[in-house]
Amino acid sequence: MGKYFFSETDIRSTWEQVLSAFWQRYPNPYSTHVLTEDVIFREVTPDNVLLSRRLFTKTNRLPRWAELIFPGNLSRSVYIVEDSVVDPSNRQLTTLTWNLNHSKLMTVVERCVFHGVEETSVWTHLTREAWISSGVFGLSRPIQEFGLSRFRSNQIKSMKGLEHALSKLQKSAAQGHNADASKDSPKKTENLTASTGSQKPQQYA
Protein backbone atom coordinates (compact mmCIF):
# COMPACT_ATOMS: atom_id res chain seq x y z
CA MET A 1 0.00 0.00 0.00
CA GLY A 2 2.81 2.42 0.78
CA LYS A 3 2.73 5.53 2.95
CA TYR A 4 0.93 8.80 2.27
CA PHE A 5 1.75 12.26 3.59
CA PHE A 6 -0.42 15.40 3.40
CA SER A 7 0.02 18.90 4.79
CA GLU A 8 -1.30 22.42 4.25
CA THR A 9 0.59 25.60 5.11
CA ASP A 10 -0.09 29.31 4.73
CA ILE A 11 3.05 31.31 3.90
CA ARG A 12 2.98 34.99 4.87
CA SER A 13 4.29 36.29 1.53
CA THR A 14 2.70 37.11 -1.79
CA TRP A 15 2.63 34.45 -4.48
CA GLU A 16 5.08 36.47 -6.58
CA GLN A 17 7.56 36.63 -3.68
CA VAL A 18 7.22 32.90 -3.03
CA LEU A 19 7.76 32.17 -6.72
CA SER A 20 10.99 34.21 -6.77
CA ALA A 21 12.22 32.54 -3.58
CA PHE A 22 11.38 29.10 -4.98
CA TRP A 23 13.90 29.53 -7.81
CA GLN A 24 16.55 30.92 -5.44
CA ARG A 25 16.19 28.63 -2.41
CA TYR A 26 19.45 26.69 -3.01
CA PRO A 27 21.96 26.81 -1.50
CA ASN A 28 20.72 27.48 2.01
CA PRO A 29 21.92 26.41 5.48
CA TYR A 30 18.92 24.09 5.98
CA SER A 31 19.41 22.00 2.83
CA THR A 32 23.08 21.03 2.89
CA HIS A 33 22.07 17.57 1.64
CA VAL A 34 21.32 19.15 -1.77
CA LEU A 35 24.59 18.93 -3.69
CA THR A 36 23.79 20.01 -7.27
CA GLU A 37 20.98 21.66 -9.24
CA ASP A 38 20.71 21.62 -13.06
CA VAL A 39 18.02 22.84 -15.47
CA ILE A 40 17.33 20.14 -18.07
CA PHE A 41 14.39 21.71 -19.89
CA ARG A 42 12.50 25.00 -19.86
CA GLU A 43 9.76 26.30 -22.14
CA VAL A 44 7.05 28.95 -22.17
CA THR A 45 3.85 27.69 -23.78
CA PRO A 46 1.64 29.82 -26.08
CA ASP A 47 -0.73 30.44 -23.16
CA ASN A 48 2.15 31.89 -21.08
CA VAL A 49 2.72 28.88 -18.81
CA LEU A 50 6.32 28.13 -17.79
CA LEU A 51 7.32 24.46 -17.89
CA SER A 52 10.60 23.40 -16.28
CA ARG A 53 12.46 20.20 -15.49
CA ARG A 54 15.42 20.21 -13.10
CA LEU A 55 17.75 17.51 -11.84
CA PHE A 56 19.02 17.54 -8.25
CA THR A 57 21.73 15.44 -6.61
CA LYS A 58 21.22 14.85 -2.89
CA THR A 59 22.98 12.81 -0.25
CA ASN A 60 21.29 9.55 0.64
CA ARG A 61 22.50 8.34 4.02
CA LEU A 62 20.97 4.98 4.89
CA PRO A 63 19.92 4.00 8.41
CA ARG A 64 22.40 1.73 10.20
CA TRP A 65 20.19 -1.34 9.96
CA ALA A 66 19.94 -0.85 6.17
CA GLU A 67 23.73 -0.55 5.83
CA LEU A 68 24.02 -4.07 7.28
CA ILE A 69 21.64 -5.48 4.68
CA PHE A 70 22.34 -3.64 1.44
CA PRO A 71 25.64 -3.68 -0.51
CA GLY A 72 28.41 -1.37 0.67
CA ASN A 73 28.86 -0.01 -2.85
CA LEU A 74 25.27 1.25 -2.97
CA SER A 75 25.38 4.85 -4.14
CA ARG A 76 25.18 7.37 -1.32
CA SER A 77 23.68 9.96 -3.69
CA VAL A 78 20.14 10.09 -5.01
CA TYR A 79 19.08 11.81 -8.23
CA ILE A 80 15.80 13.72 -8.05
CA VAL A 81 13.76 14.99 -11.01
CA GLU A 82 11.53 18.01 -10.45
CA ASP A 83 8.87 19.02 -12.98
CA SER A 84 7.24 22.39 -12.38
CA VAL A 85 4.40 24.35 -13.96
CA VAL A 86 4.06 28.09 -13.36
CA ASP A 87 0.62 29.41 -14.29
CA PRO A 88 0.68 33.19 -13.72
CA SER A 89 -2.93 33.77 -14.84
CA ASN A 90 -4.15 31.51 -12.03
CA ARG A 91 -1.25 32.46 -9.75
CA GLN A 92 -0.30 28.84 -9.20
CA LEU A 93 2.99 26.92 -9.06
CA THR A 94 2.74 23.12 -9.19
CA THR A 95 5.74 20.81 -8.72
CA LEU A 96 6.13 17.06 -9.00
CA THR A 97 9.35 15.36 -7.85
CA TRP A 98 10.54 11.74 -7.77
CA ASN A 99 13.79 9.81 -7.39
CA LEU A 100 15.51 8.22 -10.40
CA ASN A 101 17.81 5.75 -8.65
CA HIS A 102 17.22 3.46 -5.65
CA SER A 103 13.64 3.14 -6.90
CA LYS A 104 13.42 -0.56 -5.94
CA LEU A 105 14.67 0.22 -2.45
CA MET A 106 12.29 3.16 -2.07
CA THR A 107 10.35 5.56 -4.29
CA VAL A 108 9.22 8.96 -3.05
CA VAL A 109 6.85 11.03 -5.20
CA GLU A 110 6.01 14.52 -3.97
CA ARG A 111 3.47 17.01 -5.31
CA CYS A 112 3.32 20.64 -4.14
CA VAL A 113 0.89 23.38 -5.12
CA PHE A 114 1.67 27.02 -4.23
CA HIS A 115 -1.50 29.03 -4.78
CA GLY A 116 -2.02 32.77 -4.44
CA VAL A 117 -5.77 33.12 -3.98
CA GLU A 118 -6.14 36.88 -4.48
CA GLU A 119 -3.85 39.43 -6.10
CA THR A 120 -4.06 41.67 -3.03
CA SER A 121 -3.40 38.84 -0.58
CA VAL A 122 -0.11 38.72 1.34
CA TRP A 123 -0.58 34.98 1.88
CA THR A 124 0.28 31.98 -0.29
CA HIS A 125 -1.36 28.63 0.35
CA LEU A 126 0.86 25.54 0.04
CA THR A 127 -0.52 22.02 -0.30
CA ARG A 128 2.04 19.19 -0.07
CA GLU A 129 1.44 15.49 -0.78
CA ALA A 130 3.86 12.55 -0.87
CA TRP A 131 3.62 8.87 -1.72
CA ILE A 132 6.31 6.53 -0.36
CA SER A 133 6.68 2.92 -1.48
CA SER A 134 9.25 0.12 -1.45
CA GLY A 135 9.72 -3.00 -3.56
CA VAL A 136 11.97 -4.89 -1.12
CA PHE A 137 10.24 -8.13 -0.20
CA GLY A 138 9.88 -8.63 3.52
CA LEU A 139 11.30 -5.20 4.39
CA SER A 140 8.96 -2.85 2.59
CA ARG A 141 7.11 -1.78 5.73
CA PRO A 142 10.14 -0.65 7.83
CA ILE A 143 11.67 0.99 4.73
CA GLN A 144 8.45 2.93 4.11
CA GLU A 145 8.28 3.96 7.77
CA PHE A 146 11.85 5.20 7.56
CA GLY A 147 11.08 7.02 4.29
CA LEU A 148 8.06 8.75 5.82
CA SER A 149 10.05 9.82 8.87
CA ARG A 150 12.87 11.21 6.72
CA PHE A 151 10.39 12.97 4.43
CA ARG A 152 8.76 14.71 7.40
CA SER A 153 12.18 15.90 8.55
CA ASN A 154 13.23 17.05 5.07
CA GLN A 155 10.01 18.93 4.37
CA ILE A 156 10.53 20.95 7.57
CA LYS A 157 14.05 21.79 6.34
CA SER A 158 12.60 22.62 2.92
CA MET A 159 10.19 25.15 4.45
CA LYS A 160 13.00 26.73 6.46
CA GLY A 161 15.09 26.96 3.30
CA LEU A 162 12.23 28.69 1.47
CA GLU A 163 11.77 31.12 4.37
CA HIS A 164 15.53 31.79 4.29
CA ALA A 165 15.31 32.67 0.58
CA LEU A 166 12.28 34.90 1.22
CA SER A 167 14.16 36.71 3.99
CA LYS A 168 17.13 37.35 1.69
CA LEU A 169 14.84 38.74 -1.03
CA GLN A 170 13.08 41.04 1.44
CA LYS A 171 16.39 42.33 2.82
CA SER A 172 17.69 42.93 -0.70
CA ALA A 173 14.53 44.85 -1.61
CA ALA A 174 14.79 46.97 1.57
CA GLN A 175 18.45 47.78 0.87
CA GLY A 176 17.60 48.77 -2.69
CA HIS A 177 14.85 51.06 -1.41
CA ASN A 178 17.21 52.70 1.10
CA ALA A 179 19.86 53.15 -1.60
CA ASP A 180 17.36 54.88 -3.88
CA ALA A 181 16.29 57.17 -1.04
CA SER A 182 19.89 58.11 -0.24
CA LYS A 183 20.54 58.99 -3.89
CA ASP A 184 17.68 61.48 -3.81
CA SER A 185 18.77 63.11 -0.55
CA PRO A 186 21.65 65.27 -1.92
CA LYS A 187 19.39 66.68 -4.64
CA LYS A 188 16.76 67.66 -2.10
CA THR A 189 19.36 69.30 0.14
CA GLU A 190 20.83 71.20 -2.80
CA ASN A 191 17.42 72.51 -3.87
CA LEU A 192 16.54 73.60 -0.35
CA THR A 193 19.90 75.32 0.09
CA ALA A 194 19.50 77.18 -3.19
CA SER A 195 16.14 78.59 -2.09
CA THR A 196 16.14 82.24 -1.02
CA GLY A 197 13.76 84.11 1.23
CA SER A 198 12.01 85.64 -1.78
CA GLN A 199 11.45 82.27 -3.40
CA LYS A 200 8.64 79.88 -2.57
CA PRO A 201 10.19 76.75 -0.97
CA GLN A 202 9.98 73.64 -3.11
CA GLN A 203 7.66 70.97 -1.74
CA TYR A 204 8.49 67.30 -1.59
CA ALA A 205 6.09 64.43 -1.10
Image: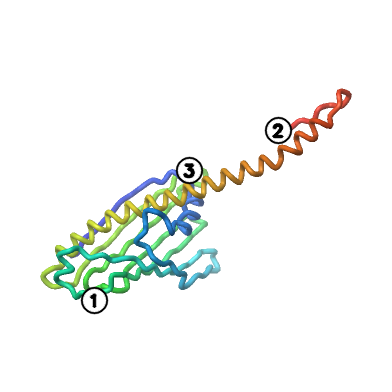
At label 1, the amino acid type is Asn
Q: Position of residue 85 (x, y in %)?
A: 45, 63
Within the image, what quadrant is residue 154 found in? bottom left
Residue 122 is marked as: 3
Q: Secondary structure at mark 3?
A: loop
In the picture shown, does residue 41 fall above or below 168?
below
* Horizontal side, residue 69 vs residue 96: left or right: left
User: Could you say which is closer to the camera, residue 52 or residue 154?
Assistant: 154
For the residues labelled 3 and 1, say whether their Cβ atoms are less than 8 Å apart.
no
User: Could you say which is closer to the camera, residue 32 or residue 173?
Assistant: 32
At label 3, the amino acid type is Val
Question: Going 46% across and 52% down the picture, which residue do you hit?
Answer: 165
In the picture shown, does residue 13 fall above or below 111?
above
Q: Which residue is mark 1?
A: 73
Question: Going 58% across and 44% down the picture, which residue do you hit?
Answer: 175
* Horizontal side, residue 4 vs residue 180: left or right: left
